[in-house]
Image: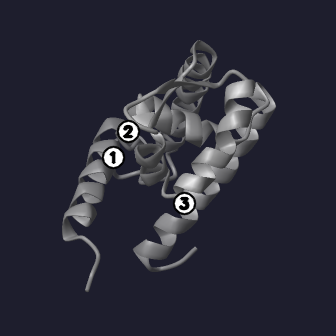
Amino acid sequence: MADRITVTLHELVAELDIYADAVLRQRHGVSFNLFEFLATLAEVGPVDVTGLARCLRVTKAAVSKRLPGLIDDGWIQTEAGTGRRVVLSLSDTGHALVQRAGGELEAEFTEMLADPRLDPEVSAGAIDAGQLNSHLAMLTRIVLEKGTPS
């Protein structure tokens, strides 16, 4: 574990992703990578390929390459947009997975926040999940507002 918050946050996110992948594979037979794709689409959809690629921080080509398999497997559906634009949305199957598995992951992580080893001085060690999420969301907005350094 590092002394720098930037490294510690990176380590935490990486470990959470590894844990989520194991849970999702064991309980639902899907990878975290697939779940992240579907969960992002659930948050921003219906959306075109460009918009989803931006949210996932990947190229349009990377999203386009995955589409045939996700459509064939019944996770997402497409409809024609204006021009050559393709609009993506979750299928009922994809939506059900995101709701069920997302709820399970939320419960797992919330339980971790209640571990008394976190800080015995603060409310028996529990960290309020809602408050933490609000702080992290605000930090994300602050970073986005700062933009890319020149």
Label 3 element class: helix
Q: Amino acid at mark 3?
A: Leu
Q: Left or right of 32: which side holds 52?
A: left
Q: Position of residue 104 (x, y in %)?
A: 59, 26
Q: Residue at x 27, y 82 (%)?
A: 149
Q: Position of residue 69 (x, y in %)?
A: 74, 35
Using the rendered image of the protein, determine whether residue 49 is visible from the camera's viewpoint. Answer: yes
Label 1 element class: helix
Residues 97 and 110: in front is 97
Residue matched to label 2: 129
Q: Position of residue 16 (x, y in %)?
A: 60, 51
Q: Earlier in the sequence, mark 2 or mark 3?
A: 3
Q: Which quadrant holds residue 11? A: bottom right
Q: Position of residue 126 (x, y in %)?
A: 41, 41
Residue 112 drawn above or below residue 99: below
Say whether marks 1 and 2 touch (CB < 8 Å).
yes
Q: Residue at x 55, y 29 (%)?
A: 102
Residue matched to label 3: 12
Residue matched to label 1: 132
Say whether marks 2 and 3 touch (CB < 8 Å).
no
Q: Quadrant of the N terminus?
A: bottom right
